[in-house]
Amino acid sequence: MLLAIDIGNTNINFGLFMGKRLVKKFVIPTAFYSFKKLKVRLGVFKALDVVICSVVPKVTVVLKKDLLRLSGRRPYIIGKDLIVPLKNLYRNPKQVGQDRLVNAYAAVMLYKAPLIVVDFGTAVTFDLISKHKEYLGGMILPGLAISLDALAQRTALLPKVKLDKPKEFIGRDTKNSMLSGIVNGFAALTDDLAKRIKDKIGRRARLIATGGNILLISPYCKSIDKIDRDLTLKGLSFIYSGLKR
């Protein structure tokens, strides 16, 4: 068994794989992670190995120690112990977030290139893969919740609003005006960028979408070809499988 862990700024996603099959998954909010919560959610720990992809170094250190206590084995860290087997054409390859590379690799393994991978997480990232299965680069934007919070923090009169589906396209109160602007605005941005990207990398490029907010925004986007909520966890499983060949 493999325990795959994706440490993000908002959530830590855990996935237990038996061979290629994802048999169990759960989420712990990053800010509220504890050893007790991990032990309760994992139950009897039978995983042979652990692979971690992280964008929060401080949490990685804590989680590594906790997993060592539970299993007696040190986890593999993506970018340190395991390298994503994808040709990286970034100007400075070390600058690319490991989660972005893992997503790109998972997409290459599951879907036909060229590809656009959009992750609607704490940040929104667009990652582009050429028809030759090369990682080309992409875009990074503030996420939906961050953008909504910024409106309240940087203005005098706009309230703090929880991210949710807007009740109407044309908002008739402040809350729904803000929600419509964020949700419909990001959907329109996604569709337009997808069109521009396809002009660059090929009209046949498929858009694969993932991330914590994907189910919220997907009904408003026209350009999404496939939703894969477990893309990062699957990518970690693929990389681990390559190690064990």
Image: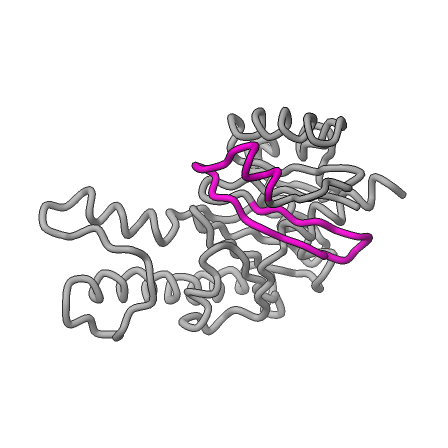
> Which residue corresponds to the image point at 58% horizontal and 45% vertical from the top-left?
100
Farthest-out residue, right:
245
Say if the magenta span includes residue 160: no
The x, y position of residue 3, in whole percent, is: 71, 43
> Which residue corresponds to the image point at 33% horizontal and 47% vertical from the top-left?
146
Say if the magenta span includes residue 15: yes
- Compared to residue 38, the image places residue 219 above or below, namely below
Count of labels in the image: 0
The x, y position of residue 148, in whole percent, is: 28, 52
| Quarter occupied by residue 74 | top right
The x, y position of residue 41, in whole percent, is: 60, 45
> Which residue corresponds to the image point at 21% horizontal and 74% vertical from the top-left?
170
Q: Nearer the viewer, residue 54 or 87?
A: 54
Q: Nearer the viewer, residue 210 or 28?
A: 28
| Quarter occupied by residue 245 | top right
Q: Is residue 34 left or right of residue 18?
A: left
> Which residue corresponds to the image point at 30% horizontal and 60% vertical from the top-left?
182
Q: Nearer the viewer, residue 202 or 102?
A: 102
- Compared to residue 29, the image places residue 225 above or below, namely below
Please provide the residue range marked out in magenta.
Answer: 13-40
Farthest-out residue, left:
157
User: In this figure, which colouring scheme has been used for the structure?
Assistant: one colour
- Compared to residue 125, the image places residue 190 above or below, namely below
The x, y position of residue 129, in whole percent, is: 63, 54
